[in-house]
Image (spheres, rainbow, N blue to C red):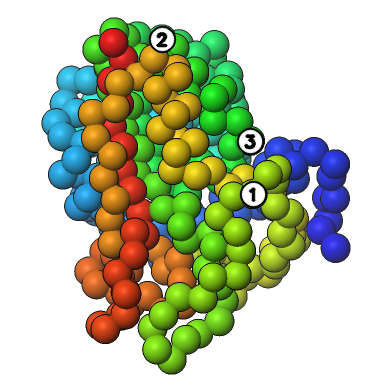
């Protein structure tokens, strides 16, 4: 059993993320040494779609220990990173000092973003594996809209919700995907897993996590209802992590194996405040 069983899914998730911070900072997965040597942590898809951020006031939601936040600072943005983990924020501040990059970091939940991080941002940014930790996308989208100045933009790159339905453990000889879960699910899904995704050999003490499945329609509708106009919604056949065992590495991404069916593995959306 988890060391901190909890009736509150957010509390359980926080305990797990707090334990993971130190593991992630030292892992090869996050490539902190390469970042400190001058590399960006942002992948080509994001760099291409995000555009020039120099001189822009930018808020990064669910920033973890600040690697992408500081990569955006290195590109000239005036950055604020927000995350609900005190240990992640402390690690982000230490990394900013080590990299000699100006940044502000705030420990708060996404539903506190406008209150704690302020308003009037040119851009709000989030990416890769963030929405599954949020129970209510309407609250998420409202805070994004409240944080943006008129004409400001929101950008998200995320794993495609189609991934949720497929078996993410069994290897397949034919490169096909096996559907084992419904696409439409209510409420949090509770998991127990001792392994860390960045360092699978590490056994965690906090096993319990809770995830919410959000459909593509739910994401776009939440943004639209918050008063944000959708500039684009792009679906991609690649992903920055190996979301399914049959995917193979191609540069910075994982893609379907040769001969396997191409499905949407990720998506990106940009929206603008009227």
The residue wearing badge 1 is 185
* Image vertical order of residue 255 relative to residue 4, above or below: below
Residue depth check, mark 2 versus mark 1: number of the one nearer the observer: 1
Compared to 74, does 247 lie above or below? below
C-alpha gap between disc 3 and disc 2: 23 Å
* Secondary structure beneath label 1: loop
Q: Earlier in the sequence, mark 3 or mark 2?
A: 2
Point out the image quarter for the C terminus: top left
Classed neighbour count for the residue bearing mark 2: other residues with Cα under 10 Å, few (<14), some (14–19), many (≥20): some
Q: Is 244 located above or below residue 75 in the figure?
A: below
Indicate which disc residue 20 carries.
none
In the rendered image, residue 260, in percent from the top left (x then y), is placed at 31, 80
Q: Secondary structure at mark 2?
A: loop
Residue placed most toward the observer, 272 or 106 = 272
Would residue 99 be seen by someone viewing this image from the given angle?
Answer: no
Residue at the image position 18 percent from the left and 20 percent from the top: 55
| Percent coordinates x, y for residue 215 in the rendering | 50, 44
Residue 164 position within the rendered picture, expressed as x and y whole percent measured from the top left:
53, 59
Nearest-to-viewer mark from 3 and 1: 1
The disc placed on residue 135 is: 3
Which residue is drawn at the image coordinates 54% and 43% (left, top)? 214
Q: How many marks?
A: 3
Residue in front for this viewpoint, 239 or 267: 267
Q: Which residue is mark 2?
A: 119
Categorize mark 3 by other alpha carbons within 10 Å: few (<14), some (14-19), many (20+): some
Q: Is residue 160 visible?
A: yes
Residue at figure coordinates x 47%, y 61% from the top left: 163
- What secondary structure is found at the residue carrying circle 3? loop
Q: CA distance from mark 2 to mark 1?
A: 33 Å
Identify the mark nearer the N-term, 3 or 1.
3
User: Where is residue 241, by image quadrant?
Assistant: bottom left
Task: Please name whichever residue, 211 or 90, is drawn nearer the observer in this view of the structure.
Answer: 211
């Amino acid at each position: 059993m988890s060391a901190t069983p909890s009736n509150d899914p957010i509390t359980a998730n926080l305990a797990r993320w707090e334990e993971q911070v130190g593991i992630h900072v030292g892992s090869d997965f996050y490539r902190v040494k390469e970042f400190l040597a001058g590399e960006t942590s942002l992948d080509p898809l994001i760099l291409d779609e995000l555009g020039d951020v120099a001189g822009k006031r930018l808020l990064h939601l669910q920033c973890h220990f600040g690697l992408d936040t500081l990569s955006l600072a290195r590109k000239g943005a005036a950055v604020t990173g927000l995350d609900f983990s005190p240990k992640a924020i402390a690690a982000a501040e230490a990394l900013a000092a080590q990299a000699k990059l100006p940044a502000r970091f705030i420990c708060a939940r996404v539903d506190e973003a406008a209150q704690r991080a302020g308003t009037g941002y040119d851009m709000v940014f989030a990416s890769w594996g963030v929405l599954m930790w949020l129970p209510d996308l309407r609250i998420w989208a409202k805070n994004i809209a409240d944080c943006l100045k008129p004409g400001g933009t929101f950008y998200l790159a995320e794993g495609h919700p189609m991934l949720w339905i497929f078996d993410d453990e069994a290897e397949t000889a034919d490169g096909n995907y096996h559907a084992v879960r419904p696409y439409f699910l209510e409420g949090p899904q509770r998991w127990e897993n001792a392994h860390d995704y960045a360092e699978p050999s590490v056994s965690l003490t906090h096993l319990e996590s809770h995830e919410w499945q959000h459909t593509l329609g739910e994401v776009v509708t939440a943004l639209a209802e918050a008063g944000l106009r959708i500039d684009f919604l792009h679906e991609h056949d690649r992903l920055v992590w190996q979301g399914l065992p049959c995917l193979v590495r191609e540069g910075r991404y994982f893609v379907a194996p040769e001969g396997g069916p191409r499905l949407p593995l990720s998506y990106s959306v940009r929206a603008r405040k009227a």
